[in-house]
Image (cartoon, rainbow, N blue to C red):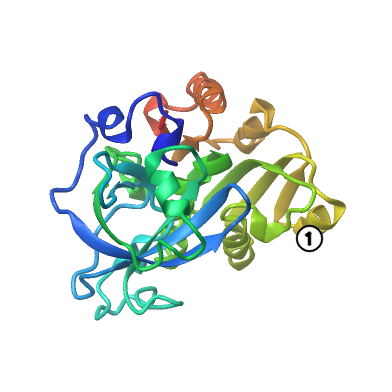
């Protein structure tokens, strides 16, 4: 997510959130256009020997040259990809980056920070930035023994996918995924969209394909998804709907006996969606309220 959706500037709105002390130097190394509204920015970490430490789910204060206020954007890459290049972590230094990196998905908006990122084609490549890690919507869930978690339910709406894709990517990369994971992803699709135009969906599909008995992906598409897109998503380990995600869809994951024993839920999406599902989950008598976590980025 980004500061574009809030009523206050990012730094003001998150003033009570935990932040790292260190400002890290990074450089924009690659830009990928997901669709006409969203781009992924890969930030190469200048200090390759130390990388940047963060917990999956956290965001960055991003300081731009000649702009007074920092923008706030959630990290979508996994922590292992920002690890020092000389460690044994297989994610570090892979892909098009020569070393450790961070990735941000940014939605277009009329703020100074986003306008600077959009710029003219290629004009921001190699731009130096300063970033600081912050945020408390993280994995492992604070105050909960991670070894007690048997089931995780993730609910994402639109760009609310950002912290959650970092979390499940980390689980997948480190082979630390709970026994049973349900991932609900609701998004709007245009008629011309392919899988690659839906933010982080290809990564989710890869994880679901690699862990068919452990990771169940539920996709809810509104708007005008094409028949070819829907056909490409059909798979026995994916549940695809062309309608809005509803509370009853979540309830089905609790239908088995003792289904909530060791369950934790993460919710991130637009305000109305987040409030609706957080209230619903916290109202379930068999689910402890402290095991329902959400990110309110507005």
Is residue 197 found left or right of 264 in the rendered image?
A: right
Label 1 environment density (alpha carbons within 10 Å; few <14, some 14–19, many ≥20): few
Whether residue 261 is visible to the viewer of this picture, yes or no, is no
Residue beneath label 1, please?
232
Is residue 16 found left or right of 188 in the rendered image?
A: left
Instruction: Say which residue appears at 55% left-offset and 50% top-offset.
Output: 38
Picture coordinates of residue 139, whole percent (x, y): 35, 48
Report the front residue among 30 and 207: 30
Picture coordinates of residue 119, whole percent (x, y): 46, 54
Report the front residue among 222 and 172: 222
Instruction: Say which residue appears at 73% left-offset and 53% top-offset.
Output: 193
Quadrant position of residue 45: bottom left
Instruction: Say which residue appears at 19% left-offset and 75% top-offset.
Output: 49
Report the front residue among 286 and 115: 115
Is residue 269 found left or right of 2 in the rendered image?
A: right
Instruction: Say which residue appears at 64% left-offset and 26% top-offset.
Output: 247
Q: Could you tell me which secondary element the residue under label 1 belongs to?
A: helix
Quadrant position of residue 194: bottom right
188 up-or-down from 285: above or below: below
């Amino acid at each position: 997510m980004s500061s574009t959706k809030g009523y206050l500037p990012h730094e003001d709105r998150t003033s009570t959130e935990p932040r790292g002390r260190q400002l890290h130097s990074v450089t924009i190394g690659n830009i990928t256009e997901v669709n006409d509204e969203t781009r992924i920015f890969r930030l190469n970490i200048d200090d390759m020997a130390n990388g940047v430490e963060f917990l999956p789910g956290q965001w960055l204060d991003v300081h731009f040259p000649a702009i007074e206020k920092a923008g706030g954007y959630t990290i979508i890459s996994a922590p292992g990809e920002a690890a020092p290049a000389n460690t044994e972590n297989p994610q570090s230094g892979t892909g098009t980056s020569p070393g450790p990196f961070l990735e941000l998905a940014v939605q277009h908006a009329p703020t100074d920070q986003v306008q600077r990122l959009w710029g003219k084609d290629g004009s921001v490549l190699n731009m130096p930035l300063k970033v600081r890690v912050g945020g408390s919507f993280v994995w492992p869930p604070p105050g909960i023994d991670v070894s007690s978690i048997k089931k995780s339910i993730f609910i994402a709406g639109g760009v609310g996918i950002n912290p959650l894709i970092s979390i499940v990517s980390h689980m997948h990369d480190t082979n630390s995924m709970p026994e049973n994971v349900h991932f609900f992803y609701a998004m709007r699709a245009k008629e011309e969209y392919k899988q690659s135009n839906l933010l982080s969906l290809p990564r989710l599909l890869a994880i679901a394909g690699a862990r068919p008995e452990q990771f169940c992906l539920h996709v809810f598409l509104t708007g005008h998804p094409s028949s070819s897109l829907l056909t490409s998503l059909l798979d026995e380990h994916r549940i695809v709907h062309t309608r809005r995600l509803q509370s009853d869809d979540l309830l089905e994951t609790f239908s088995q006996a003792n289904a909530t024993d060791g369950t934790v839920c993460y919710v991130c999406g637009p305000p109305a969606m987040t409030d609706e599902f957080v209230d619903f989950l916290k109202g379930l008598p068999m689910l402890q309220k402290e095991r329902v976590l959400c990110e309110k980025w507005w």
